[in-house]
Amino acid sequence: MPDKSDKHALERELGHLRERVDEISCELKSITSMLKGYEAEQLGRFQFFELLRGEARQKAETRLDAGMAKRCDMRPECRQRFMELLDENLSLLDRPRISEEDVKRQSDKLETLRSKAVPGRCDGCFEEVGTLFKQQTELMRQLNLYRSREEARENIDVLPEERVVKDLLDPLSNPQRMAIMKSLNRSARSFSELSELTRLRGGHLLFHLQRLSGSGMIAQNGGRGDYSLTPRGLTALEMVNDLYQRTLAGDGEASIEERAVP
């Protein structure tokens, strides 16, 4: 039968775990609320991610200050290294897609730091930074920026073919519609501005605008106002650019270099 000291230690550990679960739950609720606010207010991607990044960084600093060992000569140096790693994680939010290699690279850096730690003495500090690392990775998932390969395969298995083609691939498969999307990348445009930028006229331009509007890629402000990208349209355009940079841009450059060789 366990003695009273073991029982008290177990109760403290359970209390600590309950606090962690409650904290994670509150954080996920906060993220969900911010996402809803983002959709409601249609904040720009940059401003919204900067808001999330600032909140995540502040939380990391607070957690490290409270959770790291107080009486340790290495505390300032370790805290700096931990924050540098966590800041690198948050900088990944600037990318349209975070790969499994990106996350593994950061995880390897954390393990390298852990390999230099003193067993037993540094466990508490690495528990704190490890928890923050996992929470930042979960934030990447919540924002649909990161999926592991296995998670991606599971998503592919249930991919709705007809909807993907109708609502995503077909609207973006036309050069004129891509030209319109590119024209709206930095700011809203009027019909006449789009006509001048894309060299599409009258009914021809209107046809493509209606096709993009119908698929939720663009929206017209105030009925007859300017056209602008929707959050879906901006995400789709960024994903297309990311796909191009990863799969075709390098091949194109190589072809140019090959043609230059006599």
Image: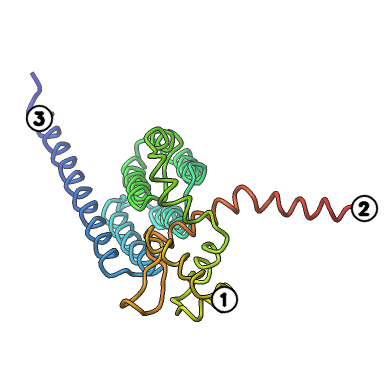
Residue at the far top: name it: 1
Q: CA distance from mark 3 to mark 2?
A: 81 Å
Q: CA distance from mark 1 to mark 3?
A: 73 Å
> Which comes before the other along the chain, label 3 or label 2?
3
Which residue in the structure is indicated by mark 2? 262
Within 10 Å of the Cα at label 2, are there few (<14), some (14-19), or many (20+) other Cα atoms? few
Q: CA distance from mark 1 to mark 2?
A: 38 Å
Above or below 111: residue 204: below
> Which comes before the other along the chain, label 1 or label 3?
3
Which residue in the structure is indicated by mark 1? 197
Q: Residue at x 42, y 53 (%)?
A: 82
Helix, strand or loop at label 1? It is: helix
Which amino acid type corresponds to the residue marked 3 in the rendered image?
Answer: Lys
Within 10 Å of the Cα at label 1, are there few (<14), some (14-19), or many (20+) other Cα atoms? some
Which mark identifies residue 236? none
Of tags 1 and 3, which is closer to the observer? 1
Apparent side of residue 162 relative to residue 131 in the rendered image (left or right): right
Front in this rendered view, residue 213 or 39 = 213
| Percent coordinates x, y for residue 156 in the rendering | 42, 36
Which amino acid type corresponds to the residue marked 1 in the rendered image?
Answer: Leu
Which residue in the structure is indicated by mark 3? 7
| Percent coordinates x, y for residue 237 in the rendering | 49, 59
**Are discs 3 and 2 less than 8 Å apart at CB?**
no
